[in-house]
Amino acid sequence: MKHVKQVRQAQAAKAARQEQDKQSRYARYRLRFARLTALARAHRRRVWIAAGAAAAVVLGAVLFSVLDKDDKPGPPDPRARQYRNVDACLLTGEKGVTEGTEGAPVWAGMQDASKSTHARVNFVPVTGEQTQANATPFVNSLVQRSCDVIVAVGRAPVAAAEAAAKTQPKVRFVVVGGQAAAANVTAVKPGDSVRADVDRAVRQGVNTPR
């Protein structure tokens, strides 16, 4: 009986050791699996980071290309008019160049001249009292702005332009309804042909060297 008991105890101890070894192997397998899983996750994370970095580089290159292209001026529009560095300036009464005023056909003639000569044109109305004294500062401002041709229409603007022409020989003056009192003044008569006459006078003026 004693021998049988010892055998049973030995078998139980052996079974315990086997179970312990089994548990130990299982623990080692779990540890290895955990390590492999961690390595796989780390690898995937590096792959995603690398892919994200590559995508960011591509996106940055695309954005730079688009923005750089937007910042660079494109070729000039062939339909856009290229103006010469020449200015023809119109001085009118306080009503300006609105339809029905004496300045309207004059302004139309200047625009016609601009189309054929590529000279810049603009107009300035005399505000306030319609007198020569009040119009004189307006004429002087056009001279100071380096207008190559000064066109005047209306009694006060014409009188001020005729007076200024005497002291500004390098500026060409066109007076509608005035007198050619100096060599640099061209007189245009009011009437149905005023548009064509102003067109011709302005074209001649902007093409005359100062």
Image (cartoon, helix red, strand yellow):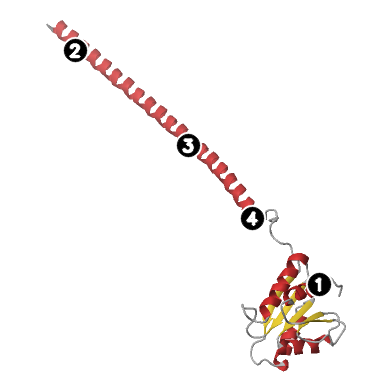
Q: How far separated are the C-alphas under marks 1 and 2?
A: 127 Å
Q: Earlier in the sequence, mark 4 or mark 1?
A: 4
Viewer-proximal residue, 107 or 91? 107
Residue marked by disc 4: 71
Q: Residue at x 75, y 80 (%)?
A: 151
Q: Earlier in the sequence, mark 1 or mark 2?
A: 2
Viewer-proximal residue, 129 or 146? 129
Q: How far separated are the C-alphas under marks 4 and 1?
A: 36 Å
Amino acid bearing label 3: Trp
- Please say if 101 is above or below 62: below
Residue marked by disc 3: 48
Q: Residue at x 67, y 82 (%)?
A: 102
Q: How far separated are the C-alphas under marks 4 and 3?
A: 34 Å
Q: Nearer the viewer, mark 3 or mark 2?
A: 3
Q: Which residue is outermost to the left?
A: 1
Left or right for 9, reference 204: left
Residue 98 location (% of width, % of height): 62, 78
Residue marked by disc 2: 9
Left or right for 8, reference 149: left
Q: How far separated are the C-alphas under marks 4 and 2?
A: 91 Å
Residue 154 picture quarter: bottom right
Q: Earlier in the sequence, mark 4 or mark 3?
A: 3
